[in-house]
Amino acid sequence: MSDWLTGLYETIFDPKFSSDNITKYVKNIGLLIKDNIITESASVKWKIKGGNVAFLHDTTFFVKVTGATLTCYSQRDSTEIFNADGNYFPEIQQFRGTKGKVTWEKAGFAADQLFAVMDNYTINTSKNNFKADSALLTFTTYFKEPVKGLLEDQTINVSNKERATYPRFDTYIKEFKLNNIYEGVNYEGGIAIQGASIKGNGTKILPAIVKISRNDTLYLRIKSVEFIFSKTGLTGAETATTLYLDKDSIYHANLGFNFNSETRQVNLYRGNNPVSKSPFFDSFHKVDMYFEYLSWNLKESKIILSRARGAALGQAQFESASYFDQNYYNQLAGIDQYHPLVRLKRFAEYYYSETFPVEEFAKWINKPVDQVIGLCIDMANRGFIFYDRNFN
């Protein structure tokens, strides 16, 4: 009690604390003694369950917590930190933890299957969320050993565990290699967990990669900045996909993708990205192919090209890579003094590379970047260039 009184005395006579701070201080200590509540407001309540609590004073008054469960109540839901050690400073409503464990039970995972351990974290107990750098994640489904990353948790009311969006964890390492996450499916990239959703993530420079094999032979390589994993498969909204045909391939720079691990079904389809309208490039048959949907049951050797799912009508077009139409070529030039394809070719020679930033090309032809982006999308959709919007 003497430590608490000393802390109260210091708070009263410290000019940086208002009368409102002092009232909250006294109220919170009273709640802690009576109901193990360290903070309570109209929207948030933090409570200590079990463990040991001691009132101490060093340079300031604080509450030492050992081996307890910290629970945050908000929005008709709760978030828990198990085996928590740390010090609570009531005058600033801050808990400084030295130990703690967060599980994904509210997202439907077993407590020993998926959890994160923290050893240095700070919580503002007036809020219903917190973050912890350098937390250690254990996820027995994917990792043999714990991995470091950023942990984030927030109390949000969710009626269905499958729709939970917290806790979240983003691994620092983005170059994991996970074999056979499903039969014949290997993954390379980072892992991010958002509640019930497991996401494979990468960067623009180093995208995540999914490799799908059939009869021990690699047939599909799919690249994206994000994949979503589930118990029955995985999906990607915008992927660069290569389907191998011996030493040749079918390639598309931007497709929607999903894989069902139970049926072994792969689906590739056009999305909302403007570049998704570009053709499939088939180096084996030397053709550009325009169609909406590709499906392949990996149990079979037959690939089906079809109209979009749910569409009453569909249209496919196959154009030889050597096909040339002078009238069509002239139409592409429009009223411009220089043909866009000629300009693209000459800039590639000037830049000493067939891959270049749109901004540099825009400067070279003295045109606004937005206008040149539109030109590149149009040329990509007509099958003349590859255009990656992630970099522009």
Image (cartoon, rainbow, N blue to C red):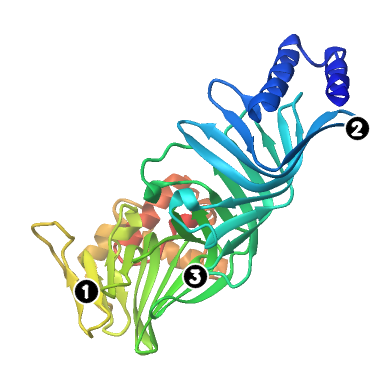
Residue at the spot x=87%, y=16% of the render? 9
Q: What residue is disc 2 on? A: 58
- Nearer to us in this view, 210 or 71: 71
Q: Along the horizontal axis of the image, is 5 left or right of 330?
A: right
Q: Which residue is mark 3?
A: 354
Front-lying residue, 239 or 291: 239
Labels 3 & 2 near each other (Cβ < 8 A): no
Instruction: Say what amino acid the circle numbered 2 marks.
Output: Asp
Whole-percent x and y of residue 88? 75, 34
- Estimate how packed mark 1 is, as few (under 14), some (14 to 19) or many (20 or more) residues with alpha carbons within 10 Å: some
Location of residue 345 with respect to 132 vertically, above or below: below
Residue marked by disc 1:
319
Residues under numbered marks 1 and 3 in contact, where contact means CB atoms less than 8 Å apart:
no
219 left or right, relative to 64: left
Q: Is residue 25 above or below residue 324?
A: above
> Quick one: 110 or 241, which is closer to the camera?
110
Q: Is residue 36 depicted above or below 334 in this figure?
A: above
Q: CA distance from mark 1 to mark 3?
A: 23 Å
Return the disc, 2 or 1, that comes first in the chain's sequence.
2
What kind of element bears circle 1? strand
